[in-house]
Image (cartoon, rainbow, N blue to C red):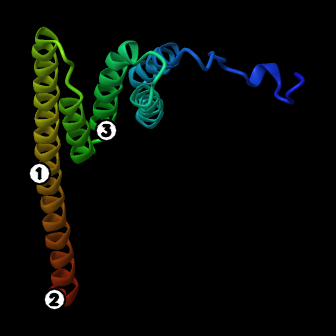
């Protein structure tokens, strides 16, 4: 144990409080790693922390501005991974509102948002198709089960001719 009462193996990372861009970058790296392992809640939590740090940064706001945009993209993609399309669109809207100042950066940001929205629409359509196919399969199964049940009742109700 250290003098603060925390065991060394419990400390993951200590970053200096005067370097919010470093903290944001580390959190975003961790969030992206969580996305690769499809740990959507962890990715979302880490990206949200990075976004909040970047949004309230007064030390080096020019460095953390891009980190905030990246965090919003990660948040939207994590929500998309959890099939929460409304929340993913909300983060995409926040991404639009956090547009960069430079004209060339705005064009790149607009393209990024279009790609994100297209991915959200595509995934929503896939889920809708999947749900429709599942509902159809379930309906067919229920019909078959009901028919089998009715045929068993009919066989038991009729007297045997032999």
Q: Secondary structure at mark 1?
A: helix
> Which residue does the numbered mark 1 point to in the structure image?
132
Q: Which mark is residue 84?
A: none
Q: Quadrant of residue 13?
A: top right
What residue appears at the point 16 percent right and 35 percent down from the top-left corner? 120
The residue indicated by pointer 3 is 79
Where residue 44 sits in the image (x, y, percent)?
Answer: 41, 34
Q: Residues under labels 3 and 2: Cα distance?
A: 57 Å
Identity of the residue drawn at 10% across and 44% down: 129
The residue lying toward the viewer, choosing from 91 and 155, is: 91
Mark 1 closeness class: few <14, some 14–19, many ≥20 residues within 10 Å: few
Q: Is residue 54 above or below residue 144?
A: above
Pair 3/2: label in front:
3
Query: Which image quarter holds the C terminus?
Result: bottom left
Specify the quadrant of the image occupied by residue 142: bottom left
Q: Which mark is residue 158?
A: 2
What percent of the width, then of the height, locates residue 73? Answer: 28, 26
């Amino acid at each position: 144990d250290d003098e603060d009462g925390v065991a060394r193996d419990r400390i993951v990372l200590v970053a200096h409080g005067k370097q919010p861009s470093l903290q944001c970058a580390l959190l975003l790296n961790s969030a992206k790693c969580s996305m690769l392992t499809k740990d959507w809640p962890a990715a979302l939590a880490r990206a949200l922390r990075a976004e909040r740090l970047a949004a309230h940064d007064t030390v080096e706001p020019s460095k953390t501005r891009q980190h905030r945009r990246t965090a919003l993209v990660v948040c939207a993609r994590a929500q998309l991974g959890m099939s929460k399309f409304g929340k993913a669109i909300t983060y995409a809207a926040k991404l639009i509102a956090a547009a960069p100042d430079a004209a060339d950066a705005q064009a790149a940001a607009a393209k990024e948002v279009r790609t994100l929205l297209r991915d959200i629409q595509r995934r929503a359509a896939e889920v809708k198709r999947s749900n429709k196919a599942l509902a159809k399969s379930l309906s067919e199964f229920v019909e078959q089960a009901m028919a089998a049940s009715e045929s068993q009742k009919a066989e038991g109700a009729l007297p045997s001719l032999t």
